[in-house]
Amino acid sequence: MLVLMKGLDMRISKLKYFDQSRHWNLNVMTFKKLTLLVGASGVGKTQILKSLLNLRNISKGSSINGLKWEIEFFILDDMYIWQGEFERIQQESNIIVMDFLIFLKTKMMM
């Protein structure tokens, strides 16, 4: 579980996201200090916001079936990369199988 301390500013710099249940893929989105989501209806603006909300919920302990993500963010001058995957749930005779994999890497910025 990813826990952030209150009062520290976090800035997202990159997001890669795949929702297997919706067959929706965000290859790589780069965020600047100011990022505007502008586009015609149905191009994915709301999906991007929903993917960020899903990651927030995962960081608080939720599990969401069929997601794969990689997010790069900064807290102060430290860069973090959080990546993980929830595989699709396979049901066999009332048995639910779910695999979860998460990595957290940190790199000091120079």
Image (spheres, grey):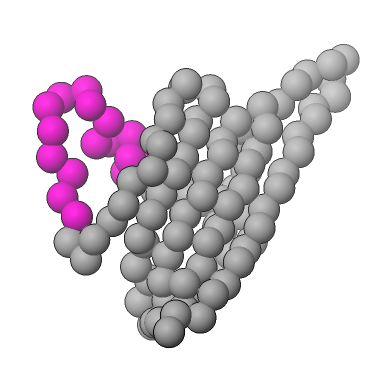
Q: Is residue 67 left or right of residue 102?
A: left
Q: Is residue 83 left or right of residue 54?
A: right
Q: Estimate the x, y position of residue 109 in percent, counting from the top left.
A: 44, 80
- Callout count: 0
The N terminus sits in image quarter: bottom right
Looking at the image, the residue that sits furthest to the top is 93
Residue 49 position in % (x across, y down): 32, 43
Quadrant for the C terminus, please: bottom left
* Up-down relation of residue 92 to residue 48 (above or below): above
What percent of the width, then of the height, locates residue 15?
41, 49
Can the viewer see residue 88?
yes
In the rendered structure, which segment of residues is drawn in magenta?
Answer: 35-50
Residue at 57% over, 72% down? 106
Relative to 69, residue 34 above or below:
below
Residue 25, above or below 60: above
Residue 103, position as x, y percentages in the image: 66, 58
At a point 46% along the width and 40% down the height, the residue shown is: 17
Task: State which quadrant residue 8 falls in.
Answer: bottom left
Q: Is residue 14 left or right of residue 67?
A: left
